[in-house]
Amino acid sequence: MKTPTAAVRPAARQSTSARNLTVAAMLSAVAFLLMFLEFPIPMLIPSFIKMDVSDLPALLGTFALGPVYGVVIEFLKNLLHLLIKGTTSAGAGELCNFTLGAAFAFTAGVVYKNNKTRKGAILGSVLGAVVMALVSVPMNYYIVYPAYVKCYGMPLEAIVGMYQAILPGSYGLLKCLTVFNLPFTFCKGMLDALLCFFIYKPLSPVLHGRK
């Protein structure tokens, strides 16, 4: 015979999973909307590369719900972007956005899961931003920029020329990505982390389903 406690546990787990999925869906929708709030920093990086904080909801989700949910939020964010706005890069831009965001959120979430302190959250965010920045170089070099060249018919030399307009010594795409995109992506992650630390505590009751 099952005890009352044993009978209640599966229902409690189902309730928690349903709540987590609801929170993840909500954060995914917010992340999708944040993708439209982007802005260039033309003095530091070519203007076709824009800053946004759309990885912030995934970081909130990975700390509140776990690293897998951070990846799920990144996936749903980009899926919504593909379905609603469409793509201008044969999906390469969305694939890159998902891969970088997932690397950021998952790394931060795994570190925090094993050290649930403020220090663990900070360390996780920094390591996540580092991983995201490192992954951005091969993703852009092998997937995104070749897709842009093909989709827009723009010679790769013209793209490199946009970097050279800011830093004349930038020769070759790999050097451009290392000098510009890598630190830019790291700073983008740290901006998301900074905002997360400001708003996580006020949002904690909603993220954890507490009143």
Image: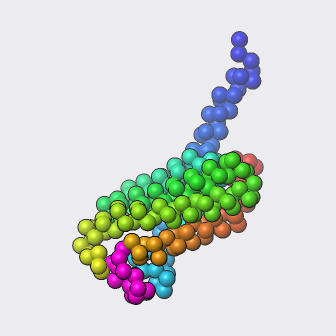
- Measured as percent of width and height from the top left, residue 107 is found at 58, 54
What residue is shown at x 52% (from left), y 56% (from top)?
A: 103
Please determine whether, in this image, residue 47 is positioned above or below residue 122. below
Occupied quadrant, residue 92:
bottom left
Q: Which of 36 and 162 is in front in this view?
A: 162
Q: Left or right of 37: which side holds 88? A: left
Q: Which residues lie in the magenta part?
A: 159-173
**Horizontal and vertical percent position of residue 95:** 40, 57
Where is residue 48 shown, x and y percent of the image? 40, 77
- Classify residue 121 as left or right of residue 165: right
What quarter of the picture does the N terminus occupy?
top right
Please say which color scheme the image uses. Answer: rainbow
Residue 132 is one of the magenta-drawn residues:
no
Residue extending farthest to the top is 1
Count of numbered tags: 0
Query: Does 204 appear above or below 46?
Result: above
Q: Position of residue 75 (x, y in %)?
A: 47, 52
Q: Can residue 87 be seen in this view?
A: no
Residue 101's place in the image compared with 39, above or below, is above
- The magenta stretch spans residue 167: yes
In this rendered view, identify the residue nearer to me: 3 or 182.
Answer: 182
Residue 130 at least partly seen: yes
Q: Which residue is drawn at 50% across and 63% down?
A: 134
Q: Residue at x 52, y 49 (%)?
A: 72
Query: Which quarter of the picture shows residue 88?
Result: bottom left
Residue at 75%, 49% (x, y): give it.
211
